[in-house]
Image: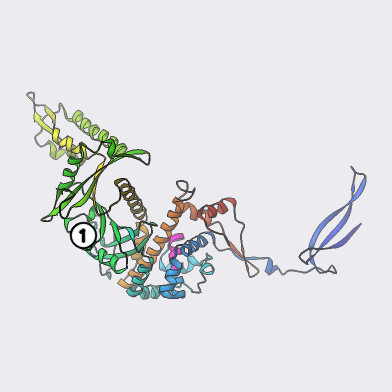
Amino acid sequence: MTYTVVQPQKNGKYYLYEVDAVWDPEKKQSRQKRTYIGACDKDGNLISKSKKNQTIQCSPVFGPYHLFAQLAEESGLRSALESVYGEEDGRRLLAMAILGVVSPCTVNQMEGEIEDTYLREVLGVEWSFEQSEVCRFLQTVGHDTGRREELFEKLAPKSGCVVFDIVCLGTDSEGLEYAEVGRKTRLTGSRQVNLGMIHSMGDGLPFCYRTYPGSVADVATIDNIVSDLASMGCSPVELEMDRGFFSAGNVALMIQCHSGFTVPVPARNGILKELISESVGQIDSPLNSDYLAGGVVRGYETHVMLVDDEFVRASADDDGAIRAVVFQDDVRRTKEVNMLYSRITDLESRLAGTEYDRFLRRKLSKRDAETAEMLEFSEGPDGKTVIGRKRKSITAKENKCGRFAVITTSELPWQELLIQYRMRNGVEYDFSQLQSDLFVGLCGKSDQDSAEGGLLVNFLSLRLRITLIERMKKSPLAGKMWVPDVISLLKKLKMSCVGGNWRLNEVTKSQRELFKQLGIRLP
């Protein structure tokens, strides 16, 4: 016998079931078998649902856009953009920046690309992203230097250490003001623009950039950066730079402007040889040694000063003395000394006993020619090549193995100064890995305003990407996943529109764990 039953629910709804009597041979009695029919009213009348309301109309990508929107919110980027550019334009810039990280595309592809995402809804942006509108928007934003500088000022740290680095971007666009023949033009065939980026060492994030003519050398840009940082209210601040910015003029300028700095001494500068020679007898002392990051490191402190635009050794009591520190990494030194004598021995074994050629040095490869500088070649009685070692040249080369020197205004102990320098290397490495993102800002831009707008968007993308990298470094994900892995996993998380209502698809265990480790809350 079959009949129907109305089952009331705690939420006030009613469900209709079909009940059928089924004989149980084990228990020797009948039992009920219920089959769900559907929702009904209290009288048992089915409530029909239209097929339209049961159909998934679309399923745009949600996961990575939610991630970067939250990172922008928590890092203060979203509030800074809305404060400077207004809510509407600020969100448009942020949407373009997030799209540039998750799914980089050109301006003419942007409209089609964003249709497959939930980005508009995440940020509350009502904009078509049609090509002509985006182009006009980029021109307007690029032309407005005042608001761009205001944004940089809001993002800038008011004190602490900052890293300044320059990258060359190639372009074939004719209308760019700073596109000139530079040092890489011969290799690429394109004119170049120099882009200077300033990062905060506090959070590792870039907060400002500057464009320079492609022919300008790195060393010539410090004057502008020092004054720019002062105008942003960054004081006191310490500039962490690479060897390309080392010069007597730059050091004198930073001292005159009371700007702190730490800059390594280039290998070809004469003062480096003097500093290392001075340190050789004392740097191996137990009093100058410490254990850091899995290896023994050593530091020797001395002073230099500027005399007639040249660096000379000085004592701490001399007027105008600048602190200099020589560092030694024992692990690295061992490897480099082994490599040095391996190269010398290899060249000796290949050339000894060969027919003597007084033009031999000209025929060697660049690497072998460098090694040959530490050797002497002469003709033996039998016309064969006789090789001797230059003791002073090899000693000088060996002394430099695993050692480098910096000059600095910092008063940190040498151990903390070394940690800070290594952090600078980490920030600079992250930037070097993402330089291609900045190149997109110049692609296809026919005028300076459009290029400046494109660079701003790609600068924001770069900041978001590094924000994620810094978050990953401090999480269990460090060394296990990289940015593309995170984006790829989260692209599978979608938001579906069912009957006009948005519903988040099921979040997998791996996606949920990823959000948790990054400290991002799910909606």
Residue 99 on the magenta span: yes
Q: Position of residue 197 (x, y in %)?
A: 32, 61
Q: Position of residue 186 (x, y in %)?
A: 22, 56
Q: Quadrant of the N terminus?
A: bottom right
- Check the image and name the residue furthest to the left: 381
- Check the image and name the residue furthest to the front: 317
Q: For mark 1, what is the residue?
A: 255
Q: Quadrant of the C terminus?
A: bottom right
Taking depth in this image into account, of 56 and 228 the one nearest to the observer is 228
Q: Which residues are magenta?
A: 94-104
Looking at the rendered structure, the secondary structure element under dot 1 is helix
Left or right for 29, reference 16: right
Residue 45, can we see it? yes
Instruction: Identify the image quadrant of residue 372.
Output: top left
Q: Is residue 89 above or below residue 215?
A: below
> What residue do we see at 41% from left, 65% from top?
106
Magenta: predominant secondary structure element? helix
Q: Position of residue 59 (x, y in %)?
A: 58, 63
* Amino acid residing under circle 1: Ile
Q: Position of residue 120 (x, y in %)?
A: 51, 69
Taking depth in this image into account, of 331 and 119 the one nearest to the observer is 331
Residue 455 on the magenta span: no
Q: Is residue 89 above or below residue 55?
A: below
Q: Residues within 10 Å of mark 1 (few under 14, many from 20)?
A: some
- Check the image and name the residue furthest to the top: 382
Left or right for 385, reference 453: left
Total tally of numbered discs in the picture: 1
Residue 447, can we see it? no
Instruction: Identify the image quadrant of residue 140.
Output: bottom left
Q: How is the image coloured?
A: rainbow
